[in-house]
Image: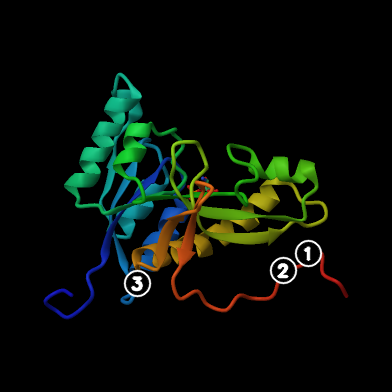
Amino acid sequence: MTTAGQPRKLRVGIIISGGGSNMAALVAATKRAEFPAEAVLVLSNRADAGGLAKATAAGVPAVVISHKGFPDRERFEMALHAELVRHGVELVCLAGFMRLLTPWFIGQWKNRMINIHPSLLPAYPGLHTHARALRDGVKLAGCTVHFVREEMDTGPVVAQAAVPVLAGDTPDGLAARVLAAEHRLYPHALDLVASGRTRIVTREDGGEQVEILGEAAPPAAMIWPRTA
Ligand code: GRF
């Protein structure tokens, strides 16, 4: 508790490379009085990231650390890490950050770094997820928030949203509907993590999964296409 009697909020740093619509959704959620996290820093590796202006407009310090200014990935990441530490960041949210991270950086933030990916992982890690899903003819696409592990787009899943694939969908059309779902999913997942309702457990087979404490009653299965 703070002196004012309010529960202390988790200090979150958000790392972006582009438009930052997920970042903006996270920042908007953190403005709610009862939300358990506050956004204390937005970091971008690109000076032309559209998200920088959005962060500044929302009153969150926005800092550019260009990867081009460093001789190698490690030194770039050491600068990122130093900036996060300087701002007292306790949890990192990757939100459209388009650089691969080294095991060193991932180790520094193990179980304290989450990412959003526009597919129902472990299906479609990597790029061009929507085009690949359409090519496979799947009926449900979606998005995933997960803790970050060394292999790209892996790690214990916090939450997922399923998005129906529609007849005649294009990759862009599907991407837009998945992005709208991302904007709902990421704040929800951050709420779960920051409020301490997630616990990462290692199963007997060595795999990891996230248990949600006080999980609400599930909705009925989403069936798509619908029956009459
Ligand atoms: C999102 O689809 C995110 O899942 C992916 O990159 C996109 C970033 O969009 N990793 P934005 O920068 O949050 O608008």
Q: Judge left or right: residue 152 versus residue 86.
A: right
Q: Is residue 163 above or below residue 49?
A: below
- Element under label 2? loop
Return the residue at label 1: 224
Residue nearer the viewer, 61 or 113: 113
Q: How crowded is mark 2: few (under 14 residues within 10 Å), some or many (20 or more)?
A: few
Return the residue at label 3: 35
Q: Which numbered tag is attached to residue 199?
A: none
Residue 163 place in picture, x, y as percent: 67, 60
Which is in the foreground here, disc 2 or disc 3?
A: 2
Q: What residue type is labelled 2?
A: Met
- What residue sits 40% from the left and 68% below the top? 197
Q: Judge left or right: residue 74 versus residue 223.
A: left
Indicate which disc, 2 or 3, sits on the residue closer to the N terminus.
3
Return the residue at label 2: 222
> Pointer 1 and pointer 2: residues touching (CB < 8 Å)?
yes
- What residue sits 49% from the left and 47% below the top? 155
Q: Which amino acid does label 3 sit on?
A: Phe
Q: Which amino acid does label 1 sit on?
A: Trp
Q: Say which quadrant the N terminus sits in.
A: bottom left
Q: In this view, does 195 lie above or below 105?
A: below
Q: How far apart are the alpha carbons under marks 1 and 3?
A: 33 Å
